[in-house]
Amino acid sequence: MAKNSRIAGFRNMSVNERRSAVADATGLDAEALAQIDATAFGPEQAANLSENVFGVFSLPLGTATNFTINGTDVLVPMATEEASVIAAASNAARMARPQGGFFTSSTQPIMQAQIQLINVADPHAARSRILEHQDEVIELANAQDPKLVEVGGGVKGLDVRLVDAKSATYVVVHLHVDVRDAMGANAVNTMAEAVSGSLAAIAEGDALLRILTNKADLRLSRARAVFDKDLLGGAEVVDNILHAYELAAADPYRAATHNKGIMNGISAVVLATGNDTRAVEAGAHSHALAEGRYTSLSTFEKDAKGDLVGNLEMPMPVGLVGGATKVHPAARTALQIAEVGTAKDLAEIIVAAGLAQNLAALRVLATEGVQRGHMSLHAKNLAVSAGATAEEATTIVAKLIEEKSFRFDRVQALLAELRSSGQK
């Protein structure tokens, strides 16, 4: 349904008011909203996802506002314990709205399985023999998942690589599998195991590893946005952001933290929707290794009008079927909030969130510095942990910022002063 992701005063609402606003914007019913309560996913349900379960660990679930993606307004569900992530993404999305928001695209959802062949006497000839028999290998792999083939997926091709290692040259076969709306790990692993015996026979060797690769470089999603220079703070801020980006592009020490900022947004949406954060993170960081050097996943440049243009392209192996996306009730509700119909839709929302998060971090670094915002939020956490009420915390935070002191003993002293003086 049509909605407006620009919800006025959302950050100042109570939790219940935010629930109502999200329901109004997305059409969520009471049953769906009930699934994001902490009690909706208990130890018995958790035992279906993990082992040795004795409890449930909860994280805050929020939504980023202001996102327009390919002309449609979207509320972006995010699960994260890190303060300022959701607010920062929302603010960056606001700055992209005047220029149409985010524009996204994706490749086909191709995941790859690897079959490692060892003890092969003639690796080059074995490669040729496998390619000569590729049609029958593909047919055997596709027979493992006729339903996937029926909906347009399945193995679309294979590749054979010779990998020179310390003790041998390995023949490594890659199956290229269109997994449609799944993340795809189970499908490609099953296919790899099914064809490994035949491949070993063709190569006249032995099959060892038979598993997907998380370097999902054939399954890419992209996001592009133009950020208004005036909303960013002017031409000097744009230039400073570009300097910050260029350091990340040139220096792996900076790139690691730069890309971590991207992943603050990416991982929060991946987690909220019940997808595999570790798979996405592994794919992202392996993709950042370009031409033998770790570099920025994103790019930034200035257009003819002086506005800032951001681009992010990265692997995005996420799905809507299987795993926690179906088992976890909050994940199902998060997908309803995002209103995604395909894995491609979800992947592109996630990459847009990553680009927004990246821009927000660069803007802070290029202006006031990261500590002001972070320490303000840290001060609030200190006040709450000391037992302050919401009203007391507001007074204490203001005092800590004024003093530029963020020590727990100072929080305790201020709280004692407030209460002894009768102030609120």
Image: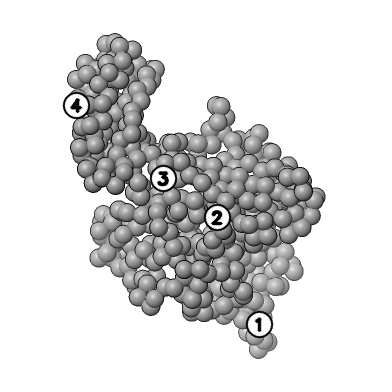
The three-letter amino acid code for the residue at tag 4 is: Gly
Residue 230 percent across, percent down from the top left: 77, 58
| Residue at 27%, 18% in the rendered image | 132
Which residue in the protein does label 4 denote? 197
Relative to 140, is 46 above or below? below
Q: In whole angstroms, how far apart are the C-alphas of marks 2 and 3?
A: 20 Å
Q: Which mark is residue 264?
A: none
Q: Badge 2 is on which residue?
A: 70
Q: Which residue matches tag 1?
A: 418
Q: Is disc 1 in contact with disc 2, using a CB cutoff of under 8 Å?
A: no
Which circle's residue, 1 or 2, is located before the other in the chain?
2
Camera-near label (4 vs 2) is 2
Mark nearer the N terminus (1 vs 3): 3
**Residue sitting nearer the eye, 355 or 181:** 181
Q: Residue at x 30, y 53 (%)?
A: 322
Q: Earlier in the sequence, mark 4 or mark 1?
A: 4
Task: Give coordinates of residue 150: x percent, y percent.
Answer: 25, 45
- Which type of secondary structure does the marked residue at label 3 adopt? loop
What label sits on residue 317 in the rendered view?
3
**Alpha carbon separation for disc pair 1 and 2:** 51 Å
What's the residue type where badge 3 is placed? Answer: Pro
**Which numbered disc, 3 or 4, marks the residue that appears first in the sequence?**
4
Q: Nearer the viewer, residue 128 or 244?
A: 128
Q: At which x and y percent is residue 72? A: 54, 61
Dots 1 and 3: beta carbons under 8 Å?
no
* Marks 2,3: beta carbons within 8 A: no
Above/below status of 312 relative to 250? below
Q: Secondary structure at mark 2?
A: loop
Q: Nearer the viewer, mark 1 or mark 3?
A: 3
Upstream in the sequence, badge 2 or badge 3?
2
